[in-house]
Amino acid sequence: MAEQLVQIPADTISNIFGNIDENIRALEKNFNVTIDNRSDGLLVTGDPDQADKTAVVLRKLAQVALTGETVTLQHVNYLSSLSADEAKEDVRDLLSDVVCFTKQGKPVRPKTLGQKHYVDMIRKNTLTIGAGPAGTGKTYLAMAMAVQSFKQGNVDRIILTRPAIEAGEKLGFLPGDLQSKIDPYLRPLYDALYEMMGPDAVSRNLERGVIEVAPLAYMRGRTLDHSFIVLDEAQNTTQAQMKMFLTRIGFYSKVVITGDLTQIDLPEGQKSGLRQAVNILKDIEDIGICRFTKQDVVRHPLVQRIVEAYERSEHPEPAHGPWDRKEGGSRK
């Protein structure tokens, strides 16, 4: 057993400990150590290697707290999951990169190294593809980048689109006009717009035509210049639809494509256009491809555990033992 004393600014201690000490309890569980609050710092006791890792995370959490950010379990679990090389990154670089502010004045910023890489790719490239599991901020950050680019006058329009595909179920005939039939598919995009711009500003810009939220089918035959275009749920595009969309890109436009290749809802026999695009476009200049992992999940911690469980289910490790089923044999 080893002991390590970590010097932490006194005014950040309560923030680091969290509500009813939940952050410290999670850190103790993650590394199988004990952490005691002493007058001269936090004393970490445990296996030497684990105590060292815990000390690194505590110092990173202090960086978070010093920026005025509220330290959450997401911070604790994410920083705990970093490798030794990744842990050398300065957390302040993440927290200082504010993409935009919501209508309520809340800063929108990347929360993981993967998200920071994604935002930097969008800034650098004309076309960026963000592929990864649910809860990694792919769509939300793309929307934030679109709104910020529009407010700064870098583009004249925001165009948000997604394929109108049911998530594994048939909804049947929906009542109302065409717009009311397609709105349920586009609701997540509206929700993000409302949060960042406010309902009144969104309505005005929709009426003026400078913001457009439409199904992917509406993109056919158009050339989109001076626009920030976000294609969401792109795993549900067919290969023909993806090619059609990619050839809509006009001058002075920026495009972000997002999707989760583990949640394809296309009819049996149809191949995902996103999967094909990731393979075909990976070596083309001015195209960035960001692959998110379960470490980048920023929703409730349970979401990350669900993603991990599905990954294990879909890619089980080979079993070894007397009950293994052998090729040509049988279980007795």
Image (spheres, rainbow, N blue to C red):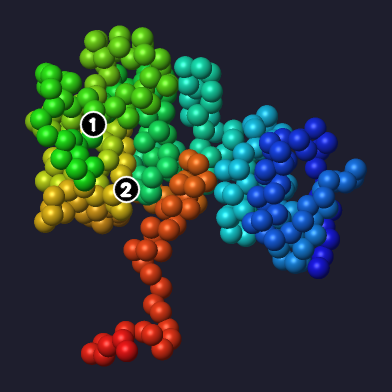
Residue 118 x, y percent position in the rendering? 43, 42
Residue 62 locus on image (x, y percent): 72, 41
State the mark number for residue 185.
1
Question: Which residue matches tag 2?
Answer: 260
Inspect the image, locate mark 2, and give the three-letter code of the amino acid beneath it: Asp
Q: Nearer the viewer, residue 137 or 174?
A: 174
Q: Is residue 304 visible?
A: yes
- Provide the secondary structure element on which disc 1 rests: helix
CA gap between label 2 and label 1 equals 16 Å
Please name the residue shown 32% across and 30% down the image.
188
Quarter of the figure that contains the C terminus? bottom left
62 sits left or right of 193 in the view: right
Residue 106 higher or lower than 331, as above or below: above
Label located before the other in sequence (2 or 1)? 1
Q: Residue at x 18, y 27 (%)?
A: 182
* Left or right relative to 300: residue 271: left
Position of residue 53 in the picture relative to residue 300 (left or right): right
273 to 222, vertically: above or below: below
Q: Quadrant of residue 206?
A: top left
Seen at 10% across and 30% down, the residue is 173
Asked which secondary structure carries label 2, the reply is: loop
